[in-house]
Amino acid sequence: MSTLGTTARFEISDELLTRLREDVVLRRIGTSIQWFEEQRDSLLFLDPGQENAAAFVRYFSQWVDIGYGDAAIVRELLSRFPKSKRATLPLCDYLQLELAEGMVASAEEETEKAIARFDLILALGEEAVADKQLLALAYFWKGRCKRKQGEYDSALANTKKGRELALELGYPRMAAVMQVLESWLCFQKERLAEAVAALQEAEAVLIETDDSVTLGNIQSGYGRIALREARYEQALDHFARAIELYRKRDPRHRNLARSLANMAYVKRLTAIRLAQKIDAAAKQRRKQPQSPAVAMPSRERVEQLRAEVFSNLAQAEEIYRSLPHHRGWGTVHIERGLLYLDTGDIERAGSEADQAYQLGAEKKDNILTARARIVQSIIESAKYEEGLDEDPTVHAQRALDYTRDALTFAKHTENRHLLARAYIFQGTVLTNDFFNNTEAARECCDRAEEYLTPGVHDHLWEEHQALKAKVLRGGGVDVMLRKWSQGVTDDQTFQQLTERFAEIIIPKVWEREGRKVSRVAARLSISPKKVRRILSRLGLKGD
């Protein structure tokens, strides 16, 4: 793109707007960002009375959203258009400013305000709004806002509408950017294969562009899917590639911070798994000191991973603080709190979780506040188990209260992972020796299972299996059989009752038959496939 020279006031020609528009839809990112850099001093001299001023603010807001500058500059330019001035503008100019207002509100995490701006545009519809690209962006940006709120069905519907309009306009690259968000929403709805296919289609369209942020988002999407499928090494590889791509555009990009936090999460889970293997091996050696030595990871490797987690989180926090970005910053506090808990530092863990909750409450962010409450519950449970303070039962009650809060927040979203996690930890609290409410814990366990994806054995699935084991050990079977004998089925279908009975009987017979699936199948006259399915659901491995 040719430059116009740095002057106190630059001309906003039709040619300039056309170039800015084409660079957006064709994802020619570097050329326009270079022009904005060269015109940095002139931008603030924009006169609302000059020709194309409102349109320029609209396009500038798009470029800020893409990665140039920050929303504060857009806010300053919008302030040049007071209500009295806007009332005299043509409808097309008024709507362009509304789009920019929505972008700024979204960037400042004022999600409801942003949605109101986009709804004003969308309420007019295609017949009244001649600029279909503006409409497409309004749908897309509203979809992003709905995603932040955890309203995934609405987010997906709006995003698809935006992508359809982009394709109608002949803008496949712009549509591909929207398709990346569609993939994320499919992922949240546990439609993983569909999410991968959407990312692959978008990547094929964008791979020849210099839109490194969207390409980074694609790698981040692959990483989250790999993480959900417990493919930790592949997840780390994808997050590392995402970080490289984000750094090409901005070494302090908010999405770079998100990938650093994701890497920290994966490394923390890896450290937990390694520590569990080391502890299990040590226990086995104590039982059988003559058994041959097996190569195992070292404690030093676990500590190295934890140090890397702290480092990743510190880098992410520095970026989030500078933006500011409440949810991202809150995520850092949550992950750091969990890491402190892993190392036994309960007080620091509590401080981190409290800060995460305050950040979520400040922005009325149901997802962040629910996640923070879950961590606070885990911490209170740890305090109860360790008998801290003169009356540790206070911590048990507080742990349950926090899980109830978490469920309340989570139910305002469609985040299946979050809902499952809230039910799991409420059930876990109910199994402790203070409450010892096995039946209520079982109900939580069952509700959590409704939100889990069959065949996906990630960290959440492992937490669910741990709760299920506690429920089975807690004497709930006798209570359940007694209720069945009295005809009390708790509104379960016969098929559900049969499945529950199979979960009780099959593992017992499996143990008695030397853990041989074929023997269980023969003894109970059922198919080996069903035996393996029940064992797998319970976290047991058949032969």
Image (cartoon, helix red, strand yellow):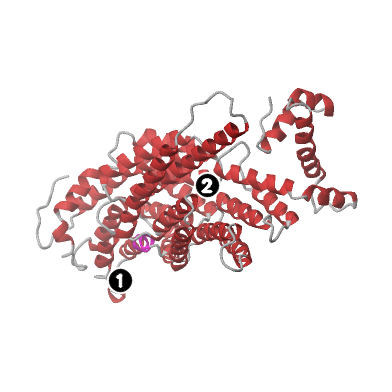
For disc 2, the marked residue is 188
In magenta, the rendered stretch is 102-108
Task: Choose the circle earlier in sequence order: 2 or 1.
Answer: 1
Residue 131 in the image: x percent, y percent?
35, 54
In the rendered image of this protein, does residue 353 appear above or below residue 35?
below
As helix, strand or loop, the secondary structure at mark 1 comes to helix
In the image: residue 401, left or right of residue 328? right
Numbered circles on residues, count: 2
Local crowd size for mark 1, using a 10 Å CA cut-off: few (<14), some (14–19), many (≥20): some
The answer to whether residue 451 is visible is yes
Question: For the residues carrying marks 2 and 1, which lies nearer the camera in this image?
Answer: 2
For the residues labelled 2 and 1, the Cα–Cα distance comes to 39 Å
On the rendered structure, is 471 left or right of 355? right
Q: Is residue 323 visible?
A: no
Q: Was residue 84 drawn as part of the magenta stretch in this picture?
A: no
- Of 195 and 346, nearer the camera is 346
Residue at label 1? 86
Q: Quadrant of the N terminus?
A: top left
Foreground: 182 or 163? 182
Type of amino acid under label 2: Gln
Element class at badge 2:
helix
